[in-house]
C-alpha cells in the first residue's frame, strides 16, 4: 500500500468551513426573493432620486465592430450632458469602448469627470494566451483608460481550472496599475447560480474592484436573480474582510422600471453605501433615453414623444 | 470647458434613499355603516351589534351584527332547507356555481385585498399576492371535483354530510373561508359560516359575490359575532363542525361535540421548527426563515417560530438573520412596500407582550431591529430571541406574533428529537442541500407538512393539517373532501 504523502510543515488541513464559504445557492428561493424585491413600488421624489442615480451610475457603452471616432464622440457628448434641455440631469459615470477608441473618448471627455472604460483581455471570448491579454490591458491603460473591463477565461473556469482563472485576474490587475478593474463573469455561459457565486468570490479574491455580469454579447445577460447572487457574494466578502467590491450588471437593462428594480436590490441587500458610482455601475446603451423620458414625465406630468430625446 | 467641469464635479448625492409612501387606494372598497346577518340569501337584522376596527389606526370601519342562538338556529334551518335541493343537484351544476365564485373573486381581487388589509392589518402585498389568488384557486380546484366524487373515492359511494358549521380564524379571513366553503359545497353540503370576531368584513363582502354568482338562497349563510356565536353554532343542529383556531378553543369544541354524532375536524395551533443544517444555501435559508416567521406578522398557525441552527454555523446564521431583519419594512398595511403590517387586535398584542416579557425574564437574549412604529394602532417590532432553552415558554407556547426563538442542535437525531418535543405538530422546515437528509428528516418529523428549502408554501392541491394537538382532518387536495363526505351508504343527518 502506498504511503500517504507527508504534509508540508505548517500545512493546515482545510477542514474548517470559513466565511465566506463558497456555499451554495438555492435556485428556486433566489429567484423568488428577486421577484419579490422587484415588486417594490418606487414613487415620486424617491423615483426621481433613483432615476438620477441610475444615470450617475451608467456606463454608456458602445462595443461594435462598426464603432467610429464619430460615433464615440457623439456618445461622449451624451455622457457629459445626457439631456441638453435640462442641466439638472447629471452626467453618466463612464463611457465604455474598445481600446482603439479610448483616445477619442479620452479627448472628448477631458475635464468632464466622466471616466473612460475600455474592455480588454481579448474581449468578449477571452480565448487567447495570457501574454496577449496582459498586453491588451497594458495598451488600453497606456491609451488612457481609467477603467478596464476584463473577461474571465470561462473555458478554464468550466473545466475546473480555478487557479488559472485566479492567476489571470491577478496578472491583469497588476497590469492595470491605477486603473480600476471590473471582472466580467459572463454569467450566461456559467450555467448555474452556484457557478456565478463561485466565480464572483474568485474574482474578488483575485483583486477585482468590481464584478460584472456580462459582456452584453450574449442573450440572457444580467438578470435580477443573478445580480442578487453576486450582491450576496459581495456582502459576504465585505462582512469578512471589510473590503467593498463594486457591482456592475450589464446587458438587457433597457427601461427605467428595470433599472429601479436593480437599484432596489442593491439598496436592500448591500445598503445605501453601495448606491454610488464608485461601487455601482449599470452597463447600458439604450437605458439613458428611457430614464430621460421618465424624468421629464415626473417633472411635466405627461410623456413626451421619443423625438424629443437624442439618439446617439 | 469650465461649465462642463462644474457639471462633472457636481455631485448631488443624497445620503439615503427613503421610499416615498406608496399607499394602495381604499376608494375601491365601499363599506356600509352596518352589516346584518346573511341568512337564507337575505340580510336578517340582529338585536345587537359591535364595532369592527382597522388595526392599523384603531379607526372604526363598520357595525357588525352579534348573532344570538336564535339567529344561529335560523341560519342552520335555512341551510337545512337549501340542503334538500343543493345536495340533489348534479355535481356538474354545483361546479358551475363554484367556478363562478372563483372567477368573481379573481375579478374583484383588488377590492377584497384592500378590505382584507384594512380589517385584518396584513400587508397589502400579501393579501394581493397570496390570500386572494389562493382563495380563488381553492374554489377553482374544488369546482373541478364536484362532478368527479365517484372517481375520487371509487366504490365508496360518497354522499354529502348535511349542514356544516364552520368557524374560521382572523389570520387569513377570506382564505380560510375559501378552504372551508369550497370543499363543503363541492361535496354537496350547505354551510353556516362564522367569521372571526375581529375580521368579519371580507366574509360579509363575500355574500355579495354569492349574490353575483346567483348561488341558491341558504346554501351559504354567514353569522357574525364573538365566541358566544361560535358556541351556539357548535351546539346547533349541524351535522359537522369544522374549526380553525386556537388549541384551547378546539379542545372545548371537541368536548361539546363528544357524543353528539357530529363530525369534527380541527385545525389548531402550532410551534413549527425550522431546522437549518450547516450545508444549506445560507442566504436563501435566512430568507425562508424570515418569511417563515414574519409573514403575516407571525399570525400563522404553521409559522416557523422555533429555529434550530446547527451549532457549526450558529454565528453567521444569526448574524445574517439580524441583518436581514433590519431591512424589513414595518408600517401601514396598505403601503405596497410594507413587509410587516399591524397586529390584528389589542388582545393579540397583549398576548405577544406577555410572552415576550416571559422570554426576557427567563433569560433569553432579545433583539429587535431599530424601526419606528406608528403611534396609533397595534404594532410589534420583528423580534428574535437567542440563547433560548427548550424549557422556556417562548420555545413551548404558540406566540402567534412576529417573534422567533433560536435554539441549536449538533446532529440530525438531536434536531428531530428537539423539533418533535412539543405538543403541536402542524408543520416543519428542513434546510439542507442534501436530498437524502431531507427525506430522512421528513420521515421522522411529526408534523403535517414538512417543507424542504422553503416555507409557508400553499397550494389547493396539497392537503394541510396537523399531528397531535395541532388538530385532525385535512384541508386542501383530495383529502380535503373527505371530512365533507360520508361513505358506503352511511345514513346522513341531512335531507
Image: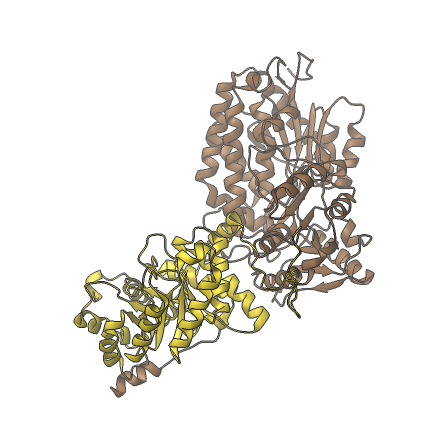
Vertical order, B260 against B15 (above or below)? above
Q: How is the image coloured?
A: by chain
Q: Is residue B234 left or right of residue A41?
A: right
Query: How far across and how far down the image is residue A148, in percent?
Result: 35, 72
The residue sitting at 75% across, 29% down in the picture is B235
The residue sitting at 81% across, 31% down in the picture is B255
Vertical order, A134 against B383 (above or below)? below
Q: How many numbered circles are shown?
A: 0
In the rendered image, the residue lying farthest to the front is: A1
Which shade is chain B? brown
In the rendered image, the residue lying farthest to the bottom is: B2
Q: Is residue A37 left or right of residue A49?
A: right
Image quadrant holding the N terminus of chain B, namely bottom left
Indicate the quadrant where residue B318 lies.
bottom right
Image quadrant holding the C terminus of chain B, namely top right
Which shade is chain A? yellow
User: Of B424 and B481, which appears nearest the observer?
Assistant: B424
Indicate the quadrant where residue B240 lies.
top right
Query: How far across and how far down the image is residue A157, in percent?
Result: 44, 57
User: Of A188 and B309, which appears nearest the observer?
Assistant: A188
Indicate the quadrant where residue A123 lies.
bottom left
Q: Is residue A104 left or right of residue A126?
A: left
Query: How far across and how far down the image is residue B160, in percent?
Result: 62, 19
Q: Is residue B321 left or right of residue B395?
A: left
User: Of B311 and A88, which appears nearest the observer?
Assistant: B311
Vertical order, B106 against A290 (above or below)? above
The residue sitting at 52% across, 30% down in the picture is B141
Q: Is residue B302 visible?
A: no
Q: Is residue B457 visible?
A: yes
The residue sitting at 24% across, 78% down in the picture is A103
Vertical order, B490 against A296 (above or below)? above
Query: How far across and how far down the image is residue B150, in percent?
Result: 56, 16
Amino acid at each position: 500500500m502506498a504511503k500517504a504523502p507527508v504534509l508540508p510543515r505548517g500545512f493546515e488541513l482545510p477542514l474548517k468551513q470559513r466565511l465566506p464559504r463558497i456555499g451554495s445557492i438555492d435556485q428556486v428561493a433566489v429567484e423568488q426573493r428577486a421577484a419579490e424585491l422587484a415588486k417594490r413600488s418606487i414613487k415620486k421624489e424617491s423615483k426621481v432620486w433613483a432615476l438620477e442615480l441610475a444615470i450617475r451610475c451608467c456606463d454608456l457603452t458602445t462595443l461594435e465592430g462598426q464603432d467610429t471616432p464619430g460615433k464615440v464622440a457623439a456618445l461622449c457628448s451624451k455622457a457629459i450632458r445626457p439631456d441638453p434641455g435640462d442641466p439638472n440631469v447629471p452626467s453618466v459615470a463612464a463611457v465604455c469602448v474598445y481600446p482603439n477608441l479610448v483616445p477619442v473618448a479620452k479627448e472628448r471627455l477631458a475635464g468632464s469627470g466622466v471616466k473612460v472604460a475600455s474592455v480588454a483581455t481579448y474581449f468578449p471570448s477571452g480565448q487567447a494566451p495570457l501574454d496577449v491579454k496582459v498586453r491588451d490591458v497594458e495598451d488600453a491603460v497606456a491609451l488612457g483608460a481609467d477603467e478596464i473591463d476584463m473577461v474571465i477565461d470561462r473555458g478554464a473556469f468550466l473545466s475546473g481550472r480555478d487557479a488559472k482563472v485566479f492567476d489571470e485576474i491577478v496578472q491583469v490587475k497588476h497590469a492595470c496599475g491605477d486603473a480600476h478593474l471590473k471582472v466580467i463573469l459572463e454569467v450566461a455561459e456559467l450555467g448555474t447560480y452556484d457557478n456565478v457565486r463561485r466565480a464572483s468570490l474568485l474574482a474578488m479574491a483575485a483583486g477585482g474592484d468590481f464584478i460584472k455580469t456580462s459582456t452584453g454579447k450574449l442573450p440572457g445577460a444580467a438578470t435580477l436573480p443573478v445580480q442578487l447572487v453576486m450582491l450576496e457574494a459581495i456582502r459576504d466578502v465585505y462582512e469578512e474582510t471589510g473590503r467593498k467590491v463594486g457591482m456592475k450588471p450589464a446587458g438587457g437593462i433597457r427601461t427605467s422600471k428595470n433599472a429601479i428594480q436593480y437599484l432596489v436590490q442593491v439598496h436592500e441587500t448591500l445598503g445605501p453605501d453601495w448606491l454610488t458610482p464608485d461601487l455601482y455601475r449599470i452597463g447600458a446603451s439604450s437605458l439613458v433615453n428611457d430614464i430621460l423620458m421618465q424624468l421629464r414625465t415626473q417633472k411635466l406630468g405627461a410623456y413626451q414623444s421619443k423625438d424629443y430625446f437624442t439618439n446617439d | 470647458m469650465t461649465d462642463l467641469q462644474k457639471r462633472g464635479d457636481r455631485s448631488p448625492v443624497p445620503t439615503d434613499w427613503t421610499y416615498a409612501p406608496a399607499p394602495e387606494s381604499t376608494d375601491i372598497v365601499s363599506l356600509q355603516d352596518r352589516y346584518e346577518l346573511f341568512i337564507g340569501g337575505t340580510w336578517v337584522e340582529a338585536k345587537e351589534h359591535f364595532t369592527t376596527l382597522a388595526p392599523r389606526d384603531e379607526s372604526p370601519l363598520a357595525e357588525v351584527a352579534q348573532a344570538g342562538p336564535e339567529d344561529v338556529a335560523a341560519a342552520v334551518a335555512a341551510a337545512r332547507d337549501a340542503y334538500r335541493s343543493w345536495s340533489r343537484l348534479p355535481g356538474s351544476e354545483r361546479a358551475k356555481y363554484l367556478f363562478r365564485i372563483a372567477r368573481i373573486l379573481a375579478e374583484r381581487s383588488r377590492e377584497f385585498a384592500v378590505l382584507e388589509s384594512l380589517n385584518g392589518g396584513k400587508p397589502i402585498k400579501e393579501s394581493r399576492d397570496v390570500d386572494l389568488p389562493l382563495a380563488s384557486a381553492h374554489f377553482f380546484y374544488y369546482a373541478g371535483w364536484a362532478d368527479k366524487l365517484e372517481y375520487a373515492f371509487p366504490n365508496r359511494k360518497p354522499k354529502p354530510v348535511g349542514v356544516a358549521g364552520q368557524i374560521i380564524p382572523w389570520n387569513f379571513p377570506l382564505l380560510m373561508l375559501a378552504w372551508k366553503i369550497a370543499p363543503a359545497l363541492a361535496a354537496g353540503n350547505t354551510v353556516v359560516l362564522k367569521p372571526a370576531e375581529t375580521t368579519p368584513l371580507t366574509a360579509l363582502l363575500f355574500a355579495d359575490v354569492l349574490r353575483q354568482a346567483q348561488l341558491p338562497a341558504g346554501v351559504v349563510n354567514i353569522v357574525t359575532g364573538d365566541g358566544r356565536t361560535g358556541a351556539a353554532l357548535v351546539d346547533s343542529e349541524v351535522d359537522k363542525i369544522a374549526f380553525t383556531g386556537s388549541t384551547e378553543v378546539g379542545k372545548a369544541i371537541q368536548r361539546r361535540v363528544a357524543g353528539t354524532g357530529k363530525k369534527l375536524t380541527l385545525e389548531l395551533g402550532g410551534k413549527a421548527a425550522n431546522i437549518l443544517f450547516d450545508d444549506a444555501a445560507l442566504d436563501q435559508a435566512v430568507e425562508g426563515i424570515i418569511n417563515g416567521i414574519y409573514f403575516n406578522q407571525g399570525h400563522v398557525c404553521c409559522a416557523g417560530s422555533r429555529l434550530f441552527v446547527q451549532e457549526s454555523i450558529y454565528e453567521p446564521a444569526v448574524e445574517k438573520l439580524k441583518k436581514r431583519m433590519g431591512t424589513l419594512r414595518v408600517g401601514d398595511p396598505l403601503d405596497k412596500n410594507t413587509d410587516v403590517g399591524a397586529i390584528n387586535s389589542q388582545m393579540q398584542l397583549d398576548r405577544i407582550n406577555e410572552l415576550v416579557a416571559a422570554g426576557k425574564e427567563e433569560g433569553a437574549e432579545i433583539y429587535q431591529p431599530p424601526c419606528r412604529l406608528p403611534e396609533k394602532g397595534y404594532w410589534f417590532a420583528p423580534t428574535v430571541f437567542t440563547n433560548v432553552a427548550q424549557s422556556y415558554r417562548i420555545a413551548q407556547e404558540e406566540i402567534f406574533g412576529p417573534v422567533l426563538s433560536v435554539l441549536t442542535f449538533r446532529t440530525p437525531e438531536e434536531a428531530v428529537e428537539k423539533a418533535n418535543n412539543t405538543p403541536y405538530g402542524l408543520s416543519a422546515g428542513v434546510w439542507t442541500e442534501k436530498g437524502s437528509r431531507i427525506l430522512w428528516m421528513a420521515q421522522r418529523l411529526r408534523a403535517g407538512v414538512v417543507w424542504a428549502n422553503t416555507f409557508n408554501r400553499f397550494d389547493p392541491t396539497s392537503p394541510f393539517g396537523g399531528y397531535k394537538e395541532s388538530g385532525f382532518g385535512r384541508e386542501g387536495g383530495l383529502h380535503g373532501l373527505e371530512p365533507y363526505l360520508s361513505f358506503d351508504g352511511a345514513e346522513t343527518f341531512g335531507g
